[in-house]
Image: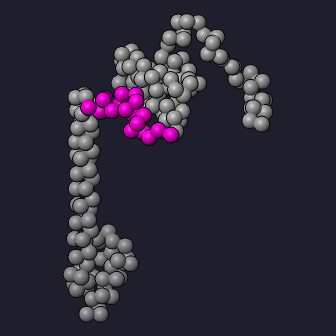
């Protein structure tokens, strides 16, 4: 069945099987090998092993971005191994809910919120200005038409499309 689908790939030179029991003791202690081994860990010990891995990652990995990615990878492995548990239950099991209570996490979250708010205000202001400019151009249309400018000239001068100016001109004629 499934193994037959990959037989050609597995017999080629492109794939090399590596068994976890072939690693020497030093390699077996590495964070990377332990993370891969978590995939085949027994379900009943998965949570404890994953929690230990997360603690090891927090101590050994200096780069914060890599550390967070590794923790998310471990969490994802556990989520797939224990599909009957909710994300909150898994976070609690792994001690990640405690992480959310730390001052560093709270400060990072606050910085992220402030940055998001700043970016949102900037985008909102930009959009508001664009809407205001558009309304100003549309408000100028009746005045320019009243001065005798053609629909085409008004559209060109104000940077509006011809349809918009025609609609305004027609509504003025209907009044």
Q: Residue at x 22, y 66 (%)?
A: 132
Give percent across and percent down for residue 161: 37, 73
Q: Is residue 53 above or below residue 81?
A: above
Q: Residue 57 falls in which quadrant of the image?
A: top left
Asked whether 55 or 7 is in front, the reply is 55
Query: Is residue 135 left or right of 26 when viewed as pictured?
Result: left
Magenta segment includes 99: yes
Residue at the extreme front of the image, as rendered: 44
Residue at the extreme top of the image, as rendered: 25
Q: Is residue 124 above or below residue 136?
A: above
Asked whether 169 or 129 is in front, the reply is 129
Q: Residue at x 29, y 92 (%)?
A: 173
Give percent across and percent down for residue 160: 33, 71
Asked whether 100 or 161 is in front, the reply is 100
Q: Tell me the quarter of the image containing the C terminus.
A: bottom left
Q: Residue 90 falls in which quadrant of the image?
A: top left
The span shown in magenta is 84-101
Magenta segment includes 145: no
């Amino acid at each position: 069945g499934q193994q037959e689908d990959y037989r050609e790939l597995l017999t080629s030179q492109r794939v090399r099987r590596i068994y976890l029991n072939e690693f020497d003791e030093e390699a077996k202690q590495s964070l990377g090998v332990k993370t891969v081994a978590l995939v085949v860990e027994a379900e009943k010990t998965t949570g404890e092993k994953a929690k230990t891995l997360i603690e090891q990652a927090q101590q050994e990995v200096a780069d914060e971005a890599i550390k967070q990615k590794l923790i998310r990878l471990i969490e994802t492995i556990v989520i797939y191994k224990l599909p009957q548990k909710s994300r909150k239950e898994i976070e609690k099991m792994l001690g990640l809910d405690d992480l959310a209570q730390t001052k560093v996490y709270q400060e990072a979250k606050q910085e992220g919120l402030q940055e998001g708010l700043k970016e949102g205000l900037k985008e909102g202001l930009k959009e508001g200005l664009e809407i205001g400019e558009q309304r100003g151009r549309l408000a100028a249309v009746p005045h320019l038409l009243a001065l005798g400018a053609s629909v085409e000239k008004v559209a060109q001068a104000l940077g509006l499309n011809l349809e918009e100016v025609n609609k305004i001109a027609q509504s003025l004629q209907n009044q």
